[in-house]
Every structure is written in structure tokens, then in C-alpha cells.
Amino acid sequence: MTGLLDRRLLFVTGKGGVGKTTVAAGLGLLAARSGLRTLVCEVDAQGNLADFFEAGPTSFKAREVQPSLWAMSMDTEESLKEYLSLQLKLPLLSRIGPLAKTFDFIATAAPGVREILTVGKLAWEVRAGHYDLVIADAPATGHIVGQLRAPEAIKELISVGLVRDQTEWMTEILTDARQTGVVIVASPEEMPVTEALELIDRLAETDVDVAAIIVNRVLPELFSRGEEEIFEQLRKPAAVKALSAAAGGPAGPVLEAARLAVTLRRTRAGHLERLRAGVDPTLPILFVPELFARTHGMRATTQVAERLGEEL
Amino acid sequence: MREIERLLAAKEIVVTCGAGGVGKTTTAAALGSMAAVHLGGKVLVLTVDPARRLATAMGLESFGNVETQVSPEAFAEIGVEPRGELWAAMLDTKASWDDLVRRHAPDAKTRDAILANPLYQNITGKFVQSHDYIAMERLYELHTSGTYDLIIVDTPPTRHAIDFLEAPERMADFFSSKFLRLLIAPYKSRFVNFASRPFYSVADRILGSAFLQDIAEFFILFQSMYDGFVERARAVERVLEDRRTAFVVVSTLEAAPVDEAEFFIEALSAKKLHLGALVLNKVLPDYLCDDDAAKVARRLCHDAATAAAALPKTVGPPDEVERVLGELGESFLNFQVVAKREAEQRAELAVKPDIVVSVPYQDRDIYDLSGLLAVGEILWA
């Protein structure tokens, strides 16, 4: 595959609850550990990206949280200030009037403004070459297309002016598959897979490339076929009794837990099949196993990074 | 009488909310099905989630902005005779906005001008906040139509679920804001040269005057609907505050959704809104926390051979049995880590409403009405 980490800008998205931030953090750590200067930016202000690196709260100003790994969170008002001073050479503007209020108003009134400030900041970091790789922990599947289409939308709405001019290079970066890609995270469950497939269809309207699908929380195959027969034998009352006696405690819950694991795995395998069948066979699909982790701290992030490293 | 049942029996509007992926839509549909079956009357489930499988589960080909009834035959097929009727509708933001404009526009000319305005089409389609507002607006519309005894609303998966509650207020504020007047002023007056003032010259340089004019035109048109709009927003707020409305917060026992649920519960109480219940969804079964079973699992991990030798030969070849037993032990301990973390989350819940219901992890997808009713039975009990 065209190395996922060879691109410059990755948008990590997926249905809420599938572990989008986990994967974004893991990818970031993997990239940094393989020597890339990496920026992970939390776009959807859930505010917990920092927990994944155990590094204290993130802000608009990027902070090095691990060697070669920087973390920041998007703040559209700050992004506007930066934009005005850097792009428009309007250093004085931030002193004109109550910027926050004016901004709030314009952002509310003019659709796409928040989105362009977000996507613009990310694309600008790529353009300025501050980092080798920028990873956005992007909005969930419902909102990502709006964000990626923002430069086009602004172009349709605004016929002249500086903002319009800026959309040109943003579009160029976003639609260049060598530079930019969307990473769709799904768990092998009904709705996450459905949303992933729908998103691929909708992304076709944007000219932004889908770089990979990452399936998170894949359960291990517990038994081979022959072992499953033994498992069925073990679940018979006489065997449960004998096992409980031999192990000196109740074996029932242990067997019941395994039955749950087997059923879950089977249900999920069906959704994985549906996902595979629904996408272009050349699209890379990477798997991250269910980690059974205690927390979502640095330990879990490291494990995700390692597993992704093996998959790449 | 059981708690959730009592809650549904006493309320006219139930709003489910929570983080994305926690099972809000299924919970809303399960509650609606149970209410229609056991309590009677006309029950409507209003969802924002276009999950096709859910439509199928409710026995519908599809459903849209207009309410559709779940056919009594769909219930009959699974041997259930509902006392009432179950209806479903999906929120279509664009269609709902169009309806709103048609209702509030002072005349046909303004109406057509608004509907054709490019900015309007953009705002209604992409403006995330408009989604929150229109959900509440549509709820109000359906409620005051007097058609339904109970409406169960599945809210948009907003970043912070609280946003949609504030949407009516924000919408009203927005239309009376100073900046809106400031922006519109130059286009309303032909006598003052505003273009020379700093605000406009900067805005013009950045956005271009044509765009500013588009915005201004749109809001000048929209202002003609201002009174109707603000009045409406206030009415929506009153309905939400009414004792006949209750909120059901849905969460899994993972850290992030729990944080959001707690935040939401506190916000509800700050707004004096009625928290009906907390539904803890996808909870792993209790037996996973059993310490004696954990001892068994550890023994199997460390010394599966002894246990395998003690079992009758009919189970299978001893070396294979040994391997299976090892897997069993390890798998149990893995799941126990997660189950214990969940138990910890539950014990640490900072806010505990009167009604807390746990719904165990469903190892199968919900395909049909009987699946919804099975979840409903758990919520009920």
C-alpha cells in the first residue's frame, strides 16, 4: 500500500463511540516513534485527547507531549486570529473591537466559516512544513464531509475577496491523494460499519481520498472448529460439575463468559464480512484487537500504536 | 407499577440523550414500542438517525419527515396485540426548515425569496446548530398538533448534548443581536455611506462585498419572520420545561460517555428540567465480576493440565481439552478487566437519578420488533 504514514494530512473519523481518538492517538504515536515530526490535532472538542498521552490539557498552541509528537486542540477563534495575522497581514485586526463577539456572529451567520478555519489551519500546517504528518482527530461521520467540503462551499458562496483566494491552495492539498487521506475507524458492529460504508459513498463527492479503514476492537477467535466441539462438551452439566470440582470453584461463569465471547465474535465477523464486501478490494483495512485495557491512557495508546505498526 | 412504565405513563414527551454510539435510538424505539403495546394511546418515536435497520425493525420500509404507522400486522406476526398505536418519523432538517419558513413568512413573495436564497439553502443543509433547533421545533409542532399521547424523541448526537436544549434561546438571541443589525444596516439605508467605516472595509476585504450583501439580504428577509420565530422559540422552551416532559439520559459505562452523561444530568438540573431516568446500556453481565469464578479462571490459565485430566474422556483428547481450558481462563480474565472497570464507573457515578436502569450487552443485533420489545422488557423490569 501507499504507506499511510507517507501522507502529510490524515483525517481520522468514524461513528461516535468506535474509538476514533484512540486510533488517532495510536497513529500519532506510531508516526512519531518511526521518526516523523507529527502533530495530532483534536478537532471535535471532546477534550480527552490529552488523556491518551497523559500529558495535561491541550490547547490551540501545539505542545510536544512525546518525543517528536505534538498535540493541540482546535479553537476556531484562535485560528481566525492566526489566519488574520499570518495570511492577510492584518496584525491590527485582532485589536479591532470585540473580536470574539464579531467572530461568533459571523461564524453563526455564514455557514462554513468554522469549518474553513479548522480545515484551513490543518492544511496550513502541512503547507508551512512544520510537521511531516498532521493527524486530525476529526468530527464523527455525520460532519466530516461538511468539513472537507468547506473550501468548495466557501468558493460557491463568496465570489471575491481574500478568503476566496485562500481556498485554492487548501483544495489543492485536500484533493491530492499523495498528501491527504481520510482514515475511517469502525468497530465490527452494525451501525459503525453501515456508517463507514455510507461515508465512503459520500466522500466520493469531495475528491478527498480514503486512505484506509481501521477496524477497532476486533475480538480474537477463541476456538478453532475442533475446539468449539470440546467447548460444547464442556458446557454439559456433568462436565461443568466435574470442572468446578477440579478447579475448586464455580466454572459456570467462566464457560458463560466464553459463550458470550464466541457469540460476539460470530456477530462481529458478519459485520466485518459486510464491510469487506462493501469496499474497493484495494482499500487497506487494518485491524486493532479489543485490548481489554484498564484505561485509555498511555499504555493503551502504546498498544494501539504497536498493533497498527504490525498491520502497516 | 414499575418505574420506567410509570414514567412513560405520566409523561407526554420523553427526550433521550447521550453521547454518540451509546444506543440512544434503540432505547427510544424500545421505549416507544413498549408504551404502544402496554400503555395504549398513540405513541410516536421521532428519530434523527436514519438507521435503515431500525426502520426494518419497526416493520417499516422506511420512514421520513411525515409520520408513518407501524402496522398492527407487524405486531400480530410476533403474537403481540398492542393496546395502542406505534408511529415513527425521522427528522429531515431541510424539509422541516422549509415548513417553518412557509408557516412564518409574512407573504408569498418573502417566502419564495427565502426558499430560493443560496445562503438559506446552505444554512439549513449544513448549519449544525440549525439541526438542534429544528429538532426541538418539530417536537413542538407534533406535540401541539394534539395527535399523540406520547412522543419519544431521539436527539441529534451533538458534541455536547446540551446544545440542542439551548437552541431555541440561541436562535432568539441571534435574531435580536446587535451584530445582525450592524451587518444589515448599510443595506437597509441608502443614505449613509457605511462602506467607509472600518468594520465594513475590513469585512469587505476579507469576505468581499457581494457575500456580505448575500448575508444581509438573507437576514433582512428572515427578519420579517422574527416575531413569529422568537415567540416560537419561547414556546418550545416552555414545552421542554413542562412537567409533562422528561429526559432519559443514555450512556454506556465507558469513561467518555459517562462524563458526558454526568455533564448533561447536571445541566438538566441547572435548567430545572426533569430528569426521568438514566439508562446504562451495553453493560457486561455481573457474573464477570465473580471473584470465585476468577480464581477458577486463573487456575485454568496456570494449570489447565490438572483440570483437563480430571474431566471425563468423552469431553475430548486431553491435550486439546487443556488448550481449550487455558483459552477459557484467559478469555474470562480479559472480560473481567472490562467488567470491573464498568462496575467502578457505576460506583463512581457522581449523580444518581431516582431511576437507574441497566441493559445488558446484547450479543445479537436488533433486527425486528420482538428484539425491540425484548430490550423494552429489560428497561421496564
Image (cartoon, coloured by chain):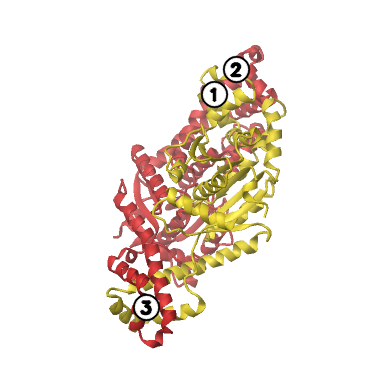
Chain colours: A yellow, B red
Q: Is residue B23 above or below residue B317?
A: above
Q: Residues within 10 Å of mark 2 (few under 14, many from 20)?
A: some
For this rendering, which residue is in front, A207 or B237?
Answer: A207
Give the spatial CA distance, label 1 vs label 3.
Answer: 73 Å
What numbered label is drawn on residue B370? none
Q: Chain of mark 1?
A: A
Q: Which residue is mark 3?
A: B305
- Which amino acid, mark 2? Phe
- Where the N terminus of chain B falls, by quadrant? bottom left
Q: Quadrant of the C terminus of chain B?
A: bottom left
* Amino acid type for the residue under numbered disc 1: Thr
- How far is mark 2 from mark 3, CA to CA? 81 Å
The answer for how far apart the CA atoms under marks 1 and 2 are is 10 Å
Q: Position of residue A75 (x, y in %)?
A: 52, 33
Considering the numbered disc 1 on the image, is that residue within a helix, a strand or a loop?
Answer: helix
Circle 2/circle 3 CB separation < 8 Å: no
Name the residue: 35% across, 74% down.
B303
Residue B91 left/right relative to B205? left
For the question of whether residue B188 can be seen, the reply is no
Mark 2 — residue?
B199
